[in-house]
Amino acid sequence: MIVFGPPVAKFVAAQTGHIFRTPHQAIGFERDGKIRAGIVFQNWSGVDIDLTVAGTEIPRSLLTAAWNYVVMNLGCRRATFRTPVDNWPAIKAMARLGARLEGQQRKFYGARDALLFGILAEEFPYGRH
């Protein structure tokens, strides 16, 4: 089930060690009453937004819902995804999306580096654009 709100942001923060400042939004995937994955949206510029991704299961339905929010609700033409360098489920999800590795931020998550992925609206395979 797709879920929204502060519990999702807390899940992503716990997984990544990142502190999210307001304003931000969060969308997640819950199964058996437990949040399994989450995406936090922040730093909206009008054409781009930063997304922080964490989770053990990142289903297509979550990715589609997140992308539709970014493009249809916020009007963005691209998104920048940030995930810990060792978060393999999120890295695999970025590959499934067709997101391109754009860089690495050293020690972004405390002791861990962050990988930056970017995707343009026309590159996203699962949503309307």
Image (cartoon, rainbow, N blue to C red):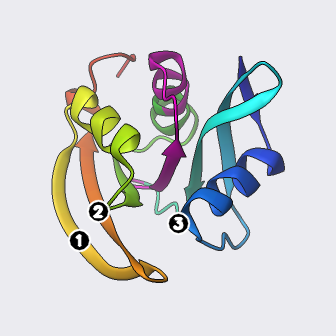
Question: How far is mark 2 from mark 3, CA to CA?
Answer: 17 Å
20 over 36 or under it: above or below: below
The spot of residue 95 in percent (x, y) is 22, 35
Q: Counting other residues with Cα less than 10 Å from the Cα at mark 2, is it few (<14), some (14-19), or many (20 or more)?
A: many
- Horizontal side of 103 relative to 42 (left or right) equals left
6 over 65 or under it: above or below: below
Magenta segment includes 63: yes
Q: Earlier in the sequence, mark 2 or mark 1?
A: 1
Q: Earlier in the sequence, mark 1 or mark 3?
A: 3
79 over 56 or under it: above or below: below
Magenta segment includes 53: yes
Q: Can you tell which mark lies on residue 104?
A: 1
Secondary element under disc 3, as helix, strand or loop, is loop
Looking at the rendered image, the quarter that the N terminus falls into is top right
Amino acid type, residue under disc 2 in the picture: Leu
Amino acid type, residue under disc 3 in the picture: Asn
Q: Counting other residues with Cα less than 10 Å from the Cα at mark 3, is it few (<14), some (14-19), or many (20 or more)?
A: some
Quadrant of residue 127 in the image?
top left
Amino acid type, residue under disc 1 in the picture: Gln
- Horizontal side of 17 relative to 102 (left or right) equals right
Query: Which residue is more in the foreground, 90 or 32?
Result: 32
Residue at the disc numbered 2: 115
The span shown in magenta is 47-66
**Residue 74 in view, yes or no:** yes
- Horizontal side of 25 relative to 6 (left or right) equals left
Residue at the disc numbered 3: 43
Q: Counting other residues with Cα less than 10 Å from the Cα at mark 1, is it few (<14), some (14-19), or many (20 or more)?
A: some
Secondary element under disc 1, as helix, strand or loop, is strand
Q: Residue at x 63, y 54 (%)?
A: 12
Asked whether disc 2 touches disc 1, contact meaning CB atoms under 8 Å apart, the reply is yes
- Horizontal side of 2 relative to 17 (left or right) equals right
